[in-house]
Amino acid sequence: MSLPRAADADVALLLEGTFPYVSGGVSSWVNQIIRAFPELRFAIVFLGSRRDDYGEMKYALPDNVVHLETHYLYEFATAEMKPQPRHGDADAFARSQALHDGMRGDPASGEALAAFRDVVHEIFPGGRLPADDFLHSEEAWRVVSDSYRKYCTDPSFVDYFWTVRIMHAPLWTLTRIAHELIPARAYHTVSTGYAGFLGAMLHRARRRPLILSEHGIYTKERKIDLFKSEWIRDNRNVFQRDPTELSYFRQMWIRFFEWMGRFCYDAADPIVALYEANRLRQVADGAPPERTCNVPNGISLARFAPLRTRRPATPPPVLCLIGRVVPIKDVKTFIRAMRSVVNRMPDAEGWIAGPEDEDPAYAEECRNLAESLGVAGNIRFLGFQRVEDLLPKIGLTILSSISEALPLVILEGYAAGVPTIATDVGSCRQLVEGLDAEDRALGRAGAVVNIADPQGLADAALALLADGAAWHAASAAGIARVERYYSDARMFGEYRRIYDSALAAGDR
């Protein structure tokens, strides 16, 4: 399939592991935004891990996507010939080493960030730190060896060496992308991380505005991933290991993503969060407060409100988790909760509606768990579904995640008249109970439960499904809340102002 190509664009969207190759909340939001501004010509830069990790596009490209390019950060070209000996620029590597030393100090001092900007300039094409020097030069070997002896608490130099390589090599891919990307009047990234790093480089190299919209806090989500990752080694024996400490290699990855986030925050204006707690987290992580703001997600009321007429008179005993079958959604807690639900409501069903291809091993573990708990007959793995087909048939949306931002699925359920049971993550308490006195006066649109608490989730779900009056009150509260605060028209109005401002600045 040929990808659209153009000579220039109005807005270049920088997307890491999301639209159009991955379905889900952020991808749906990107699709919304592009379609909301048909007068703008969008270029998309998709950043993935490896080509084999993605299938076909999950979304049809809107007509105003005039350019799409895909890049895979962990597909490294292998040299056909033996690398030639290289000395490397001693001064450039010394500044790089000083930068890494500075990253261990006070992140608010500004000195390390200034050094970060300086070193990034040198890895651009034509700079004094080319990729071949990083991979093959004597100076690179000296810096890596010295840093290992000076800092590393893990006894394996081999693992340290390859961690440094794997961690840093994508940065040269990103500089090449930044150097070759078609002109755009403004850049818009929906995360920090690699996409945010690319955005910051483009902002500095081309003097065009950078918009950052963070749905979840990237560094927080990567920390969760890194805590769970089994591929990160810890070679210390039981006598060398402090059980209260993270492994050194996990610390390296966390520090790496934190500083990439600071580099993006330093360049972006505005820095958009979905809700106040995340805005404050951005400020704590280095975002200049005066550049931050909140723009909540919004959904199409016209699309979902008609679904209310298709609902049965009494709430169906169906609990539905709509989302990817991946560990961060904690599908296993939902399955364990269904064991308690079925004990007291034998005809209840738990539906899991989302793709299973992102982490097939975890999906298989979820199926095995349902079998072992004796609820396989009550749980249906539906795969990817159109949410409009699901909402009229269910009694509750379930969100058992260990991390979220402002979940669209809760808002979509509200618009269709479906209450929710959600874990106390992200903005979920705000969505269920209300943000301020005026919002709280609308009532609770479900219940909030603790993370990884299957019994609490089950009790909350049963309390609503078994009490028609309580369920209808929660349904009415959700409808009122989404109509007042979370419409797509309201969100699009905010982004129209953001785009108009950025494009005007980009044209100057």
Image (spheres, grey):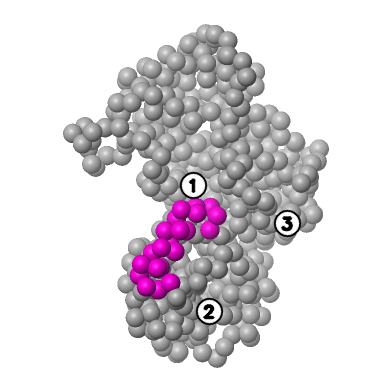
On screen, 328 above or below 251?
below
Q: Where the C terminus falls, by quadrant?
A: top right
- Near mark 2 (Cα within 10 A), the count class, few <14, some 14-19 or many ≥20, is many
- Which residue has dot 2 on it? 394
Q: Amino acid at mark 3?
A: Ala
SS for callout 2: loop
Q: Amino acid at mark 1?
A: Tyr
Instruction: Find the magenta span and give its range.
Output: 356-376
- Where does the image place residue 75, in percent across and percent down from the top left? 58, 33
Tell me what residue is drawn at x 49 percent, y 30 percent: 166
- Which residue has dot 1 on it? 218
Looking at the image, is mark 3 or mark 1 nearer the viewer? 3
Tell me what residue is drawn at x 65 percent, y 18 percent: 126
Q: Which mark is residue 60?
A: 3
Q: Is residue 375 magenta?
A: yes
Q: Amino acid at mark 2?
A: Ile
SS for callout 1: helix
Q: Does residue 280 appear left or right of residue 13 in this picture?
A: left
SS for callout 3: loop
Tell me what residue is drawn at x 35 percent, y 83 percent: 344
- Near mark 1 (Cα within 10 A), the count class, few <14, some 14-19 or many ≥20, is some
Q: Earlier in the sequence, mark 3 or mark 1?
A: 3
Looking at the image, is mark 2 or mark 1 nearer the viewer? 2
